[in-house]
Image (spheres, rainbow, N blue to C red):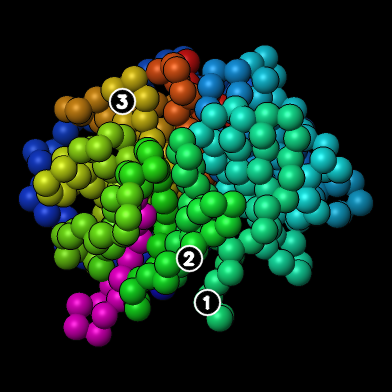
Amino acid sequence: MLYGLAAATLVVGLTTTAGQAQAVPTLKAAAAPPAWKIFYAGRLTEGYLHSVAAPSPSSAWAVGQYQDANGGHHAAVLRWNGRAWSLTPPGSLPDMKYWYSVSASSPRDVWIYGWNEERAGIAHFDGRKWREVAFPELPESAPVSYAELASAHNATWLVGETWVSRRVHGGWKTTTLPAGVRISSIDARSAHDAWIAGTVYTEARGLQPYTARWNGHAWKRVKTPANKLGVNDVWAQSRKSVWVTGLIPKGEGWVPTVLHWNGRRWKNVKMPDQGQWPLAISGNGGKVWVTGDPAGFDGPPLYWRFDGRRWTTVAGAVPAGGRVEAVNALAPIKGTARLWGVGNYIVDDGQVAHSFGLVQRDR
């Protein structure tokens, strides 16, 4: 079974429904034309994008990897300046082969995390230039791959599968998580309000969902339904509204699941069960958006939008001749009702399937 932070792209497999389910919302047909527009495609060759952050309408960042004409692999950092996306010159960044996560509390406070063959690395952008930041000291043998960043005003976290590091006085303070915990995602609203989500394994109960909240002093576990949910992503909409995506195993398949916490308890906001694997969750303008895979994309990306009563399937766009493989991350654009989505699409030339980085925005 796969679990932990790799689940953002390698989806976790997981049994019964979570908590007291709401009435099943109705599913509306997709609107036409597609409500998501392509802003970057066809230039990040043999590449993909894994994370995106948008601290303002004129400032956004997306990170991932690409391959040059000679087969060399390079870390990718894309920047949106309000008019277009462009690739940040590699010479202005630390030497990494893959940037995995990006988070930004403002255009002058941007963080990226990645790795090369020898080590993991973190870099910070202050609005003028990038500089590398010392990596946290971790417990011996602690895994560092697939860590994720979350930042808010005067607060930054880096979370691995078994640990959480918080930026303190120019350094890092690391907390080791309880035995059996594997974290999949983190989100932060402020220095006193952040969430981590993943799974916890015990011999008595097997694999169960796990969520914990940062209250400004410590991480406190928030009880979740015992439903064997494998968590993929968490989004903190407000202090009393938190959303989690994942899968619950059922027979030889799974049930796509979205849980909502209202400040007191979790409820299952049932998604239409069309075989999709819900990945990223976020929202803006009072709407909740989920990306996923309806049993293997064979065309444009699909998004699921929830307005509080019903789910609507919304089609994205894809370049001619392409098929979207994944939309890995969503980011609300601060100061607007829009979101950025990033991932990759595939073009099959008859002999080889080529991957390209993809950036889309709703409306």
The residue furthest front is: 169
Q: Nearer the viewer, residue 218 or 249?
A: 218
Residue 144 x/y as whole percent: 58, 67
Kind of residue sitting beneath label 3: Lys
Label 1: state its secondary structure.
Answer: loop
For image coordinates 37% across by 25% down, the residue present is 284
For image coordinates 8% across by 50% down, the residue present is 20
Tell me which label, 3 or 1, sits earlier in the chain: 1
Residue 134 x/y as whole percent: 67, 58
Q: Which mark is residue 174?
A: 2
Q: Is residue 119 visible?
A: yes
Main secondary-structure element of the magenta-colored stretch: strand
Q: Is residue 53 magenta?
A: no
Q: Left or right? Give the position of 57 relative to 46.
A: left
Q: Which residue is mark 3?
A: 287
Q: Left or right? Give the position of 325 relative to 23.
A: right
The residue furthest right is: 70
Q: Nearer the viewer, residue 350 or 335?
A: 335
